[in-house]
Image (tube, coloured by chain):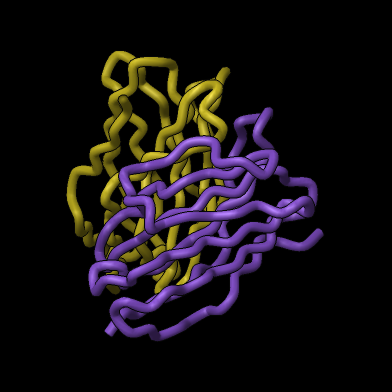
Amino acid sequence: ETGVTQSPTHLIKTRGQQVTLRCSSQSGHNTVSWYQQALGQGPQFIFQYYREEENGRGNFPPRFSGLQFPNYSSELNVNALELDDSALYLCASSVYSLNTEAFFGQGTRLTVV
Amino acid sequence: AQSVTQLGSHVSVSEGALVLLRCNYSSSVPPYLFWYVQYPNQGLQLLLKYTTGATLVKGINGFEAEFKKSETSFHLTKPSAHMSDAAEYFCAVSFTGGGNKLTFGTGTQLKVEL
């Protein structure tokens, strides 16, 4: 059974650029949630994908968007990057109907310069 | 709406001493409660969870937590701290039917001293 994997682990982008982060969910999980963790803060919920559709969104602007694929993997896209987007982005997978724990990946460290 | 408050952004204990990390929650519906640990530059690892049933829950690495509805608390304890426990700890809440959308506290950095 594989865990949650995220790619890339680190990347540096310039303000105004666009970025795509990827997440492979744990085997048997059908739900993927994305979180942003700024330095020294707790993770903040961005959005969740279930059945390839957005299923809830936190207080993030529309330039944060996502996709979920038939194999339950997911992408997080951020357009028009701002310096404040610099953070650790965490992906979590779970089984929606069970409402049990979410399993987290190692995260992608995004630095915007 | 739900929220989590962790009292004390930094806690320091001696090796072998009791660890107590505080968490209070606010939720308009019965909550599910979680404690996660994060080591530097890593993701989050689940320590323990409360969903239903027994209010005292035991987790990994000797940690436990007690759900107290009357106090809206879910404090994390460990009888004897070990150097390897030094990390950041996050309390989180979700709710029935919420599909595992977690609301996290701001975290408590635990330092363990010799």
Q: Is residue B70 above or below residue B99?
A: above
Q: Residue at x 32, y 51 (%)?
A: A61
Q: Position of residue A4 (x, y in %)?
A: 65, 61
* Quadrant in which the N terminus of chain A appears: bottom right
Percent across and percent down for residue B46 are: 53, 50
Q: Colour of chain A?
A: purple
Q: What residue do we see at 37% from left, 42% from top?
A: A58
Q: Tell me, yes or no, if residue B71 can be seen here.
A: yes
Residue at 65 percent across and 52 percent down: it is: A68
- The residue closer to the viewer here, B14 or A74, is A74
**Residue A101, relative to residue B99: is it above or below?**
below
Give the residue at x 69% y 57%. Answer: A73
**Quarter residue A94 falls in:** top right
Quadrant location of the C terminus of chain A?
bottom left
* Residue situated in front as seen by the camera: A32 or A64: A64
**Left or right of A94 on screen, residue B76:** left
The hue used for chain B is: yellow
Image height check: is B25 above or below A1?
Answer: above
Among the 4 quarters of the image, the one containing residue B40: bottom left
Image location (x, y in percent) of residue A97 = 68, 28
